Image (tube, helix red, strand yellow):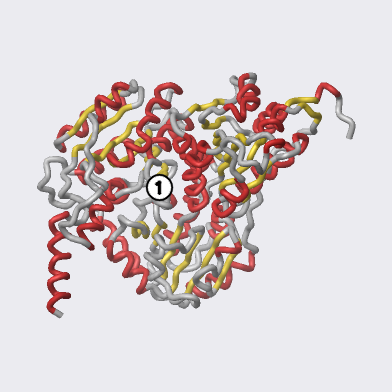
């Protein structure tokens, strides 16, 4: 193909042109000299493309991952070679385990220096191979359109995930002629019409069916269609870990989330069920409670598993019926199925719902700051379209247990348990949805890993409200310490800075709360501030989780040890 000379561009310019062709409108970065040509090309499209320069590569990667979750389009992260790529790897791991579309672009050493251990050189194909859907390096400038088109397609098709592309520095500066790609179209499998009759037959023979919904890529429409099906047929529904927004928690069919904060009775209910109807969720460790709610390899109870990745079907548990389909496509075919009377499993459904309602009722609290009451108050104020981001740690038990989720509202959290996620994710969410309230929930440990990204929000016009749960410890690990090695505390205490002063120094509105009654007024002031805000919640270290205390854990562990010694 003979192209006009005017088509000749640098590799950096070709790459940016491809991002625009594929509909990209935002990227998150820490700048580096290894991809200066890309940065220079972005200068010319500032009116069409927002570049958000984060304070740390892990923050940039987590922002891109959150963007992918919220939009369904690949979140784009740009970092420099070596240390920059290593810092960003946590976001790639999160995107892989959470099935989030993402594109990590890494500046690389020049092609003439390859394989000499040049300054900051790493082979990113080997480094990211196990935690990316595709990891490659673009060595031929004219092939940039091909690689970028493939990257968008792979990141969004089937089970979504991260793609990593290394960009040699001299490849980006090279001038060549190259034809542009056309905008990508994700490919998602869909269930054939004949797939539904066998599922109906299995359900017809069930006395205690449960639907488990989760995984990536649920549109608001699909969430509503699943709710229509469940309510029309009277089947209880639970969601997988940190996918609570998949199903309206106010529905009479909602039974809780099968994660770390759902009703304890829900795990037993799944073990008692005689049919599990799993739509979109991976049957991984968290969702299956350590692979205990089903037997392996032959699944018991009976199992219908719908997933977009053929490799997930039968990976651990062999289903009675396996359906290769995205959740969106499958539920579209299921929505109008009125197979059974709505009261057929009435007792089973109502008891599951009662378990959930009992679990989210605020317990009596003796602490000055009642976190359950604060979360319930938060839920009343933020409305149905707020975005709530979560970090890793026991503090997330309160927003997971006591907040009510439903679309178009979103719950965004790392299912791989990555600390430091929530603040960058909240920054990204507030930039993607500037018209929505965005609440970021983070512990003191996680905040010290990424709290500086509040500065990114200040610079770029984001307005997240960060709820900082401060108990001066790495609470989750302290909980496990007391459970396994009571009174032998080491490595989990934290001496923290003045978080309010820290946030104010970055340009945020900030307050410290020690009593329940002060929370609602502080929340109103944070919303009214119209800029990034932080509310520090000074929590009692004794209240280690939503269901127990440090003292109770310690006493129970000591009693077990005493009994074991006596035996």
- Residue at 51% x, 37% y is 83
> Vertical placement of 266 versus 369: above or below?
below
- Residue at 31% x, 60% y is 353
List x then y, in percent, for residue 25: 58, 30
* Quadrant that contains the C terminus: bottom left
* Quadrant that contains the N terminus: top right
- Residue at 61% x, 37% y is 118
User: How would you rate the neighbour count of disc 1 (Cα within 10 Å): few for under 14, some for 14-19, many for 20 or more?
Assistant: some
Of 67 and 391, nearer the camera is: 391
The answer to whether 393 appears left or right of 22 in the picture is left
Corner quadrant of residue 104: top right
Corner quadrant of residue 293: bottom left
Q: Assign a secondary structure to mark 1.
A: loop
List x then y, in percent, for residue 375: 25, 42
Q: Is residue 243 visible?
A: no
Of 111 and 5, nearer the camera is: 111
Single out the residue that lies furthest toward the bottom: 567
List x then y, in percent, for residue 440: 35, 37
- Residue at 15% x, 57% y is 487
Single out the residue that lies furthest toward the right: 2
Of 376 and 556, nearer the camera is: 556
Single out the residue that lies furthest toward the front: 116
> Vertical placement of 431 versus 366: above or below?
above
Q: In this figure, which residue is indicated by the disc labeled 1?
A: 418
The answer to whether 36 appears left or right of 423 in the picture is right
């Amino acid at each position: 193909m003979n192209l006009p000379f005017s088509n000749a561009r640098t590799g950096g310019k070709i790459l940016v042109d491809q991002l625009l062709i594929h509909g990209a409108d935002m990227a998150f970065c820490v700048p580096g000299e290894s991809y200066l040509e890309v940065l220079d090309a972005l200068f010319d499209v500032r009116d069409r493309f927002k570049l958000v320069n984060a304070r740390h590569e892990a923050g940039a990667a987590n922002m891109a991952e959150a963007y992918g979750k919220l939009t369904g389009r690949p979140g784009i992260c740009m970092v420099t070679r070596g240390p920059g790529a290593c810092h960003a790897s946590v976001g790639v791991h999160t995107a892989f385990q959470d099935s989030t579309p993402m594109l990590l672009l890494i500046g690389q050493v020049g092609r003439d220096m390859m394989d000499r251990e040049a300054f900051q050189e790493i082979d990113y194909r080997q480094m990211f191979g196990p935690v990316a859907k595709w990891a490659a390096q673009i060595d031929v400038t004219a092939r940039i359109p091909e690689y970028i088109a493939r990257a968008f397609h792979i990141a969004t098709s089937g089970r979504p995930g991260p793609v990593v592309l290394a960009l040699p520095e001299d490849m980006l500066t090279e001038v060549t002629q190259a034809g542009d790609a056309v905008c990508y179209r994700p490919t998602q499998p869909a269930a054939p019409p004949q797939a539904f009759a066998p599922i109906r037959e299995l359900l017809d023979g069930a006395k205690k069916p449960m639907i488990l919904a989760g995984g990536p890529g649920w549109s608001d429409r699909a969430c509503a269609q699943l709710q229509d099906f469940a309510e029309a047929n009277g089947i209880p529904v639970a969601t997988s870990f940190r996918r609570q927004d998949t199903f309206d928690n106010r529905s009479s069919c909602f039974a809780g989330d099968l994660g770390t904060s759902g009703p304890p009775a829900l795990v037993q209910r799944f073990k008692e069920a005689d049919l599990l109807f799993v739509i979109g969720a991976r049957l991984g460790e968290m969702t299956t409670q350590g692979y205990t709610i089903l037997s392996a390899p032959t699944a018991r109870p009976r199992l219908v598993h719908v997933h977009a990745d053929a490799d997930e079907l039968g990976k651990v548990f062999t289903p009675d019926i396996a359906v290769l389909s995205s959740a969106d496509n499958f539920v579209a075919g299921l929505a109008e199925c009125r197979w059974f009377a709505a009261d057929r499993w009435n007792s089973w459904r109502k008891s599951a719902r009662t378990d959930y309602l009992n679990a989210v009722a605020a317990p009596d609290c003796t602490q000055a700051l009642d976190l359950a009451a604060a979360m319930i108050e938060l839920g009343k104020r933020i409305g149905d379209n707020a975005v709530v981001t979560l970090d890793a740690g026991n503090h997330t038990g309160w927003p997971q247990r006591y907040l009510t989720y439903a679309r178009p509202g979103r719950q965004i959290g790392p299912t791989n348990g990555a600390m430091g996620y929530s603040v960058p994710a909240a920054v990204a969410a507030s930039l993607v949805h500037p018209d929505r309230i965005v609440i970021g929930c983070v512990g003191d440990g996680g905040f010290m890993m990424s709290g500086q990204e509040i500065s990114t929000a200040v610079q770029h016009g984001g307005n997240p409200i960060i709820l900082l749960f401060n108990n001066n410890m790495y609470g989750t690990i302290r909980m496990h310490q007391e459970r396994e090695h009571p009174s032998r505390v080491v490595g989990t205490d934290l001496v923290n800075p003045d978080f309010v002063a820290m946030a104010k120094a970055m340009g945020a509105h900030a307050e410290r709360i020690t009593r329940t009654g002060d929370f609602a007024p502080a929340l109103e002031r944070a919303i009214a501030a119209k800029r990034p805000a932080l509310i520090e919640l000074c929590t009692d270290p004794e209240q280690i989780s939503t269901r127990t205390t440090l003292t109770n854990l310690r006493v129970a562990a000591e009693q077990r040890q005493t009994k074991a010694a006596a035996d």
